[in-house]
Every structure is written in structure tokens, then in C-alpha cells.
Amino acid sequence: MDSKLQMERCNSSMQLTRAADYAVRVMVFLAGNPAGERASLAQIVKATDAPDSFLSKVLQGLTRAGFITSRRGPAGGFEISEIGRLTSMREVVEAIDGPISLNVCLSQRRPCPRRRWCAAHPVWARAQEALLGVLSRAMIADMASGKVEWTALAHIRTGTDA
């Protein structure tokens, strides 16, 4: 079975939301623009392939997080902030979706009562740590410039410490 069909059939709860995906696309697009340059909603829609009705909510979330600024009027549009240029993919995702948790037992809100004896808990915890590490090291500015440092992430593929 090809991977696209597998993804279409996948009902996993471990997927990030579309909003988080669109937010990362927006941030990478805006970070690719020169400092001080604004993009219109139409330009962002075209560059990110995201529906404009849904994108408005994503842009509001990114603005609330301080990652982008918006200005109305003829010279208006959206611009990435200095903080936004320095942010990681993890910070963008969490600004939209809240804290990332692969399993409810890893939630920061309430500790899992089975944590001490559950054989799966340390596996979930290690997987969570790996995911958060990858997303934390993926910087928006590097993604926009095509300089994502994959060698720093190589230990995850090989299972070694780099």
C-alpha cells in the first residue's frame, strides 16, 4: 500500500492539527521575506496552500503569540517579528495547539496514576522527548533559508547520541 493511501486511512490521534501545520507554513513563508516586508492575506494563502477562511484564525494565533504583526490598510499585511524569526517549530506548534503530548499519560496537567508501574510509560516518554527535541531544534529562520541542520538530528535516525 502506498504511503499516501496509508496517511489518508490513518485516524491517529498523534497527528498535529491542520492549524499547526498551516502556522508553520506561514512562519516559514514570512521568514523568507526581507525584514520589514509585509505580505497580504492573498499572498500567504497562495504561498501556503491554506484556505483563507481557516488561515485567518491561524494568523490571529500567531499574532497573539507575538510571532507576527499585522497592519490594516493599503500598505498593510502580515510581517514576521524578530521573535518570530528566532522561534522554533515547536514554539509555533505550541502557540497554536498548546503543549504537545503524544499520550494522555504524558500530559503536564495531571500525572498518570500508572506511571510507576506501566511498561509503556518510559517508551512514550522517550518518544515524546525525541519529538520535542526535533521540533525545538528546527528553527523557523533555518527552515526558511533551507539550512535545517539535519546532522544535529541524526542521532534520532540512528539511535545514537550525536
Image (cartoon, rainbow, N blue to C red):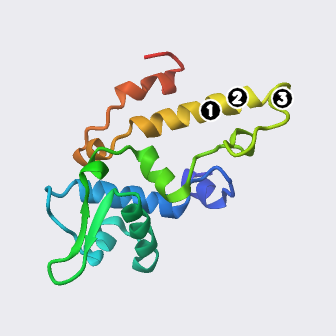
Outermost residue on the bottom side: it is 74
Q: Nearer the viewer, residue 46 or 62?
A: 62
Is residue 44 rendered to the left or right of residue 8? left
The disc placed on residue 123 is: 2
Q: Amino acid at mark 3?
A: Cys
Q: Position of residue 23 (x, y in %)?
A: 41, 60
Judging from the image, what secondary structure is the residue with disc 2 in? helix
Please tell me whether residue 126 is drawn above or below residue 85 in the rendered image.
above
Disc nearest the viewer among 3 and 1: 3
Q: Amino acid at mark 1?
A: Ala
The residue that label 1 is drawn on is: 127
Q: Position of residue 85 (x, y in %)?
A: 27, 48
Judging from the image, what secondary structure is the residue with disc 1 in? helix
Is residue 90 rendered to the left or right of residue 100? left
Q: Position of residue 35 (x, y in %)?
A: 14, 56
Question: Are the two marked residues, 2 and 1, in contact with CB atoms closer than 8 angstroms?
Answer: yes
Q: Neighbour class for label 3 at 10 Å: few (<14), some, many (≥20)?
A: few
